[in-house]
Image: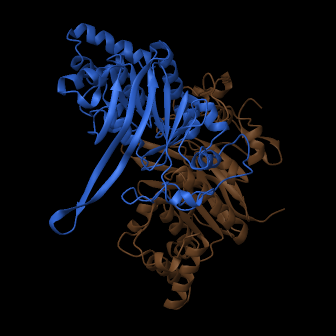
Chain colours: A brown, B blue
Amino acid sequence: MKEIILSVKDLKVRFFTRRGTVRAVDGISFDLLKGECLCLVGESGCGKTVTALSILGLIDSPPGKIVRGEILYDGLDLTKCPAERLRHIRGKEIAMIFQDAQSALNPVFTIGDQIVEQIRLHLEVSQQGARDRAIGLLKEVGIPSPGEVAGYYPHQLSGGMRQRAMIAMSLSCDPQLLIADEPTTAVDVTIKAQIIEILRRLKESRKMSIIFITHELGIVSEIGDRIVVMYAGRVAETALASELLKNPKHPYTSGLIKCLPDITQAKERLESIPGTVPSLDNPPGGCLFNPRCNRAMAICRKEQPPPVKVNKEHSVFCHLY
Amino acid sequence: MKDHKLLTVENLKKYYPVSGGLLYRHLGDIKAVDGVSFYIKEGETLGLVGESGCGKSTLGRTILRLEEPTEGTIIYRRADITRLDKKGLRGLRKEIQIIFQDPQSSLDPRMTIGQSIGEALLIHGVKDERERGQKVTDMLERVGLEAQHALRYPHEFSSGQRQRIGIARALAPSPRLIIADEPVSALDVSIQAQILNLMLDLRREFSLAYLFIAHDLSVIRQVSQRVAVMYLGKIVELAEAGEIFSNALHPYTEALVSAIPSIRKRKKTRILLPGAVPSPLNPPPGCHFHTRCHRVLPVCSQVEPELKDVGGGHLVACHLYGV
C-alpha cells in the first residue's frame, strides 16, 4: 500500500456572480499516492483547473469560495490553512505549471533571475548557490547551453523552451507534488512529445507525484497512472489508466473515447456526444450527464448517482451499475 | 468528373519583407510560403498539416487572395486567380469560401446570425429578401441549428454552435471549395466530433472540396483523401492519406506520426525531434529540416531536395529517396 500524499474530500467550490451561483466544483473526492501521476480529464468548464487552484489556495475570493470539503496534505487541511503557512507550501512543496508559459513568466526579468528568486524565497542559499542550482535545473529539463539561456528574457525563447523553463522553475525547491495544468495544450505535436518525455523522466528520477490536467485522452495514456474523469464539476469515473481506456464504464467516458478520430484509419462517421456541457449556474437535476446520455433512465433525471465500485481501483458514478 | 482538377497551385510563394535598422533597410524576407505546388480535385479533401509557423494558414489565405502572392499561379477551373481584378475576385469568392479557427472573432458581434449569413448571400447576388430569409433558414437547419436562431447574436451561442454558424455562412453562397483553417482545434473533443461529422456530411451532400488545414494529425486522417505535410514554407511530403500514415517516407512526417499521443496502441518507437522549428527568416541551408533530422546525410546541409514522385503519386522531398 502506497502512501497517500494528498487527499481531496468532498470539495465544493462555488462562484457567486451577479448572474447567479456557479457550482464549478460540486463534491469531488480523490486521493493522490506518492510517486504517481494522476490525470484529471474533462472538457472545458468541467472544474479541473478550479480543483487545482483550490489545492494551492489560489481561488479568488470573492467571487469564488470553497464552501465545503477538505484538502489534506501531510496531515494539514489546506482549505483552512493560514495564508502565511500556505505561502511556504506553495512553490516549495507543491508547485504548479501552466498552459501558457508566456504569461506565467515575468517578461521583464531573465529566466535565471526568476528561478533564483524562487529558490532564495524558500531556501537558505547564497546568490551564487542559487544561480548554480538554477542552471542545473535548466540542464535537467533539457535546455541546451543552460548558462546562456539563464540570461535570456522569456520572449527570446521559443514556446517549447519557455515551457521547459517554467518546468525548471517549478522544480526549484524539490516539490513533493507538481500540478501541471494543460502544459501540452498550446504547443505543437513534436514539442508536446518532448514535454511529456521530460515530465515522465522527472517523475521517475525525483519520485515526484504529479496531478496532470488535460482534455486529451491520448496524452493520458502516455503519462497517467490513474485517471479521474470529470464532468460538469463532478467525478464521473475513476480508474487505473490502462483499465479506464480499455474498459470504460460511464457513458460519458466511453463517449469521449469513441469520438476521438483514429489515426490508423478513417471512419465513415465519428461517434459523437449530442448537445453540450450544461450551464453550471442552472444544472439539470439528477445525474448532470443525463440530457446527453444515450442510456439515460427515469432515475437519472431524479437522483444523483452514488459511486459504484467496479473493482478495487475502479469506481463509476452511474445508475446503470 | 471526379478526377477533374478544381484548383491547381503552381510554385506559389508568399514572402514578407523584413526591414529595420538604420535607414529602414530591407534585411531579408520571411518566406512563409516558398514554392508550393499541389492540386485539389472536385469533391476531394486535401489535408494540410504542419506545426505552427510552417505557412499553412498563409497558404490558405493566399489562395483566396486575402494575401497577395509574391510569385506563382493559382488556377481555379480555368482562371488564374493571381490575375483576377476586383470584380473577378468577388465571383471567385462565391466559389471558394473559408472557415476560420475562431468563430467568435470571425462573426460580427453586432449583427444577428441571420444578418451575417444574409449578407454573404446579398453580396453574392441573392437580391430578394424573402429568398434570402428562406436560404438562411435552410442553411441553419442544415448545420443543425434552428430557424429561430437567425434572430440571435453570436454571444448567445456556445463555441460549437458558433462554428456551425461559420460553416452555414461559408456554405450559403453554394461554394465548390471550402478552405477550412483549423476549424475544430478550438473545440472540445465531443464537439469536435460533431463538427467533423457535419463537414463530412456536407461534403457528400454538396460534393464540396475542402482544403483542410490542421495541426492535429488524427483529425486530418479522419477527413482527408490526400495529405500534404508542410515544414518551413515547403511541402515535404504529399500522398494518399492511408499511405502517409502507414508508410511515411520523410523523416519529419515519420516523427510527426510517431508523436501522436494515441489511446489505441502505445508507441514503442517514438521519434523525438530535438529542438524547435528554426526561424523562417533565416532557415538552415540545404534541406530546412536537416538540423532536426534523425536520418541526416552529408548532402542534406548543402543541397535542397526537390519534391519528387517516388511511385503511385507519393511525393517526397528528401535525399534519402530517389537518385
For residue B93, above or below residue A288 = above
Give the percent coordinates (x, y) of residue B64. Answer: 31, 31
Q: Is residue B287 left or right of residue B294?
A: left
Q: Is residue A240 visible?
A: no
Which of the two residues, B194 or A249, is positioned nearer the viewer here? B194
Give the percent coordinates (x, y) of residue A112. Answer: 46, 78
- Location of the N terminus of chain A (image quadrant): bottom right
For residue A195, above or below residue A270 = below
Please name the residue shown 63% across and 61% down the image: A71
- Location of the C terminus of chain A (image quadrant): top right
Which of the two residues, B282 or A67, is positioned nearer the viewer here? B282
Q: Is residue B203 visible?
A: yes
Please name the residue shown 72% across and 52% down the image: B269
Give the percent coordinates (x, y) of residue B239. Answer: 56, 33
Which of the two residues, A294 or B200, is positioned nearer the viewer here? B200
Q: Is residue B69 left or right of residue A25?
A: left
How many numbered discs sit on the rendered protein? 0
Please name the residue shown 56% across and 25% down the image: A274
For residue B155, above or below residue B169 = below
Q: Is residue B146 left or right of residue A39?
A: left
Please name the residue shown 38% across and 16% down the image: B139
* Residue, far front: B323
Give the percent coordinates (x, y) of residue A76. Answer: 65, 69
Q: Is residue B16 left or right of residue B159?
A: left
* Residue, far left: B23
